[in-house]
């Protein structure tokens, strides 16, 4: 067994079981997919969609926080704090806008998929952070 903690969060995630790696991939793709909807056609012509810009920005903010946390405390449940800080305001904004967006378009369908996938992740992250604060901080001790 290798006793060294991987140098990056990405490499630590690669040591996880395949099902968890698949979940992380689905999660990332569901946020990155907003790139395809950043510009949309409206009655007045083409316009930027602020929901998509916010989702993309939140992806980078959460990633930066998680990389910083990984460097500070390692591969622990507290890493979920990056998603909670970076994604929750955007999630709330998109949730608030969902009725106006609807589900009649590909963009509307995407927004609802994003809300489901990101919502599941935020619930998992909230549980992880609570567990960390309650003293159950280690994800795995495979590098101990």
Image (cartoon, rainbow, N blue to C red):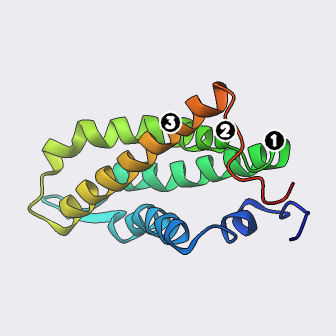
Q: Position of residue 31 (x, y in %)?
A: 44, 61
Mark 3 vs 2, N-terminal side: 2
Callout 2: SS: helix
Q: Is residue 110 left or right of residue 10?
A: left
Q: Nearer the viewer, residue 12 or 41?
A: 12
Q: Is residue 84 left or right of residue 98?
A: right
Q: At which x and y percent is residue 136?
A: 66, 34
Identify the residue at the far left of this view.
Answer: 104
For residue 66, say whether it is visible: yes
Against 46, is 78 above or below?
A: above
Residue 36 horizontal/vertical position (percent): 36, 71
Mark drawn on residue 127: 3
- Circle 1 residue: 73
Q: In terms of secondary structure, where does tag 3 sit? A: helix
Give the residue at mark 2.
Answer: 78
Mark 1 is surrounded, within 10 Å at the Cα level, by few (under 14), some (14 to 19) or many (20 or more) other residues, namely few
Q: Nearer the viewer, residue 1 or 127?
A: 1
């Amino acid at each position: 067994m290798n006793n060294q903690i991987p140098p990056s969060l990405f490499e630590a995630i690669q040591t996880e079981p395949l099902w968890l790696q698949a979940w992380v991939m689905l999660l990332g793709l569901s946020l990155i997919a907003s790139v395809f909807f950043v510009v949309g056609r409206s009655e007045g012509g083409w316009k930027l969609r602020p929901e998509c810009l916010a989702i993309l920005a939140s992806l980078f903010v959460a990633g930066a926080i998680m990389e910083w946390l990984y460097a500070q405390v390692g591969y622990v449940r507290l890493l979920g704090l990056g998603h909670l800080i970076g994604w929750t305001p955007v999630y709330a904004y998109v949730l608030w806008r969902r009725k106006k967006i609807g589900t009649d378009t590909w963009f509307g369908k995407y927004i609802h998929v994003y809300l489901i996938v990101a919502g599941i992740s935020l619930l998992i992250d909230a549980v992880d952070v609570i567990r960390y604060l309650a003293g159950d901080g280690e994800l795995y001790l495979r590098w101990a």
